[in-house]
Image: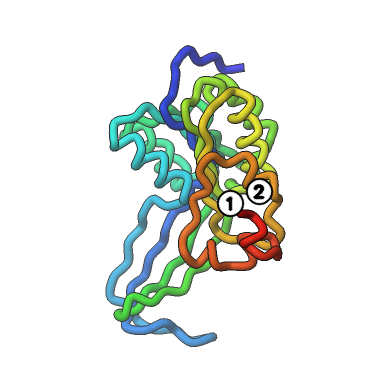
Amino acid sequence: MIMCDQAFDVVVVGSCMTDLVSQAPRLPKAGETIHGHKFFIGFGGKGANQCVQAARLGVKTAMICKVGKDYFGDSHIRNFKDNGVHTDFAWQTSEEATGAASITVNDAGENAIVIVGGANMLLGPEELHRAVPVISRAKVLVCQLEISPNTSLEALRMAKQHKAKTIFNPAPAMTDLDPEFYRLSDVFCCNESEVLSDECWGGRDRWEWE
């Protein structure tokens, strides 16, 4: 087990995605090829974004994630280090590519997105238990649903066992969300569309939760 004698303000258990963004006058129809006018590659993933932004605000952060052993995975690890994020538990795997989002944006700002989770979906309870040295020393633990829901749930359980505050972002929304997510979340951070969605409430009337 990797030992860690540091305390962390924020530990994020979550996703790393590489955003492949094309801007075009309009969105293509099925089977159609059109010319775009701009392309860029950016760092994405709700978990990675949250972790880097916390680090930029000056708090001590650690990222628990899994990326591919590829160019995009190397870039994510380097970006974390450049922003002062602790990366001992940011693993790379040869089994899957780094998660990616192919995004097309039209001139009106509307978009079409295809997300491939890739290596994100291989982050599991085994890795979490190897990361106990940072989870046990976290003041706040943050997770979302761009990794396996079971992994996020286990991360929240572990954080509670170690007396950390928990923040859970239930995005992207999923059906039949385990009620344990609500019980384990000190802050349940959803946007307006998610809080009004039946998916967010596991098919139950949301007022039953009050």
Is residue 79 something one can see in this rendering? no
| Structural crowding at the residue carrying mark 1, measured as other residues with C-alpha within 10 Å and reported as few (<14), some (14–19) or many (≥20) | many
Which quadrant of the view contains residue 9?
top left
Who's the residue at 61% across and 30% down the image? Answer: 160
Residue 179 percent coordinates (x, y): 69, 49
Q: Amino acid at mark 2?
A: Pro
Marks 2/1: CA–CA distance: 6 Å
Identify whether 140 is placed above or below 50: above
| Structural crowding at the residue carrying mark 2, measured as other residues with C-alpha within 10 Å and reported as few (<14), some (14–19) or many (≥20) | some
**Residue closer to the observer: 167 or 65:** 167
**Residue closer to the observer: 48 or 179:** 179
In this picture, residue 43 sits left or right of residue 70: left
Does the residue at mark 2 contact the one at mark 1 (Cβ under 8 Å)?
yes
Identify whether 107 is placed above or below 10: below
Asked which secondary structure carries label 1, the reply is loop
The residue carrying mark 2 is 149
Is residue 30 something one can see in this rendering? yes
Q: Quadrant of the N terminus?
A: top right
In this picture, residue 28 sits left or right of residue 97: left
Badge number at residue 145: 1
**Residue closer to the observer: 194 or 210:** 210
Asked which secondary structure carries label 2, the reply is helix
Who's the residue at 51% across and 20% down the image? Answer: 137
Residue 64 percent coordinates (x, y): 53, 34
Q: Amino acid at mark 1?
A: Leu
